Image (cartoon, grey):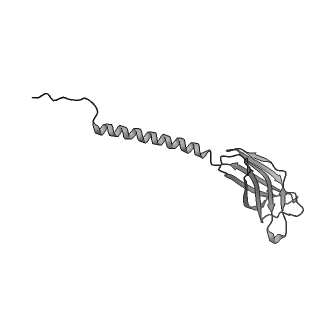
Amino acid sequence: MGNNMRRTKGISSILGTVIVLAITIALGALLYAYANGMFSNLTQNVNVGAQAQIIVNPSTGESYLQFSLTNNGNIQVIIYNITVRGASNTGSLGYTSNNVSIELNPGQSYQDIMPITSSSLSVQPGNYYTVIFLGKTSTGKPFSIVLNVLASETE
């Protein structure tokens, strides 16, 4: 019968397994990235960063709230109320600004300086005050940001 051994040409079984494995991993990674991007848009993430500073002019007694807001989430937010409250032992009620309408799209920032005009709240440098930002998402879900702020004099 003889020495008629047939030599087949092709890739080895080890190399074939490695190629199939690489293709499977690549397709799995693509599917994960697609699903992750698709579902992250479905979850509404409210993440608003806020910084505030209360500045008092000692010569005039006027006080100002300087603040900055940054929308780090993935949904539009609307700030509709800013409240500055004194410590409860001072007996001062606070100052509320209801005519605020700050719309922040995702990634957007906003800065402003607002006078604190209230006969019931006398701001003293060196005291801490509570600043509350009330807001809602574009779908109507409410949220709030509460900061403890030290009042300081202008120089």
Q: Nearer the viewer, residue 90 or 93?
A: 93
Where residue 99 sits in the image (x, y, percent)? Answer: 85, 51
Residue extending furthest toward the left: 1
Where residue 34 sits in the image (x, y, percent)? Answer: 53, 41
For the C terminus, the quadrant is bottom right
Question: Residue 119 appears in which quarter of the rendering?
Answer: bottom right
Q: Nearer the viewer, residue 136 or 115?
A: 136
Residue extending furthest toward the right: 119
| Above or below: residue 47 compared with residue 14 | below
| Above or below: residue 126 compared with residue 100 | below
Q: What residue appears at the point 76 percent right and 55 percent down from the top-left corner?
A: 134
Q: What residue appears at the point 65 percent right and 46 percent down from the top-left corner?
A: 74
Residue 57, visible in the rendered structure: no
Q: Nearer the viewer, residue 73 or 11?
A: 11
Left/right placement of residue 124 relative to residue 20 reads: right
Left/right placement of residue 5 relative to residue 71 reads: left
Q: What residue appears at the point 81 percent right and 72 percent down from the top-left corner?
A: 89
Q: Nearer the viewer, residue 1 or 67?
A: 1
Q: What residue appears at the point 75 percent right and 53 percent down from the top-left corner?
A: 135
Residue extending furthest toward the bottom: 89
Where residue 106 sits in the image (x, y, percent)? Answer: 68, 44
Where residue 112 sits in the image (x, y, percent)? Answer: 78, 49
For the N terminus, the quadrant is top left
**How many numbered tags mark residues here?**
0
Left/right placement of residue 111 relative to residue 39 reads: right
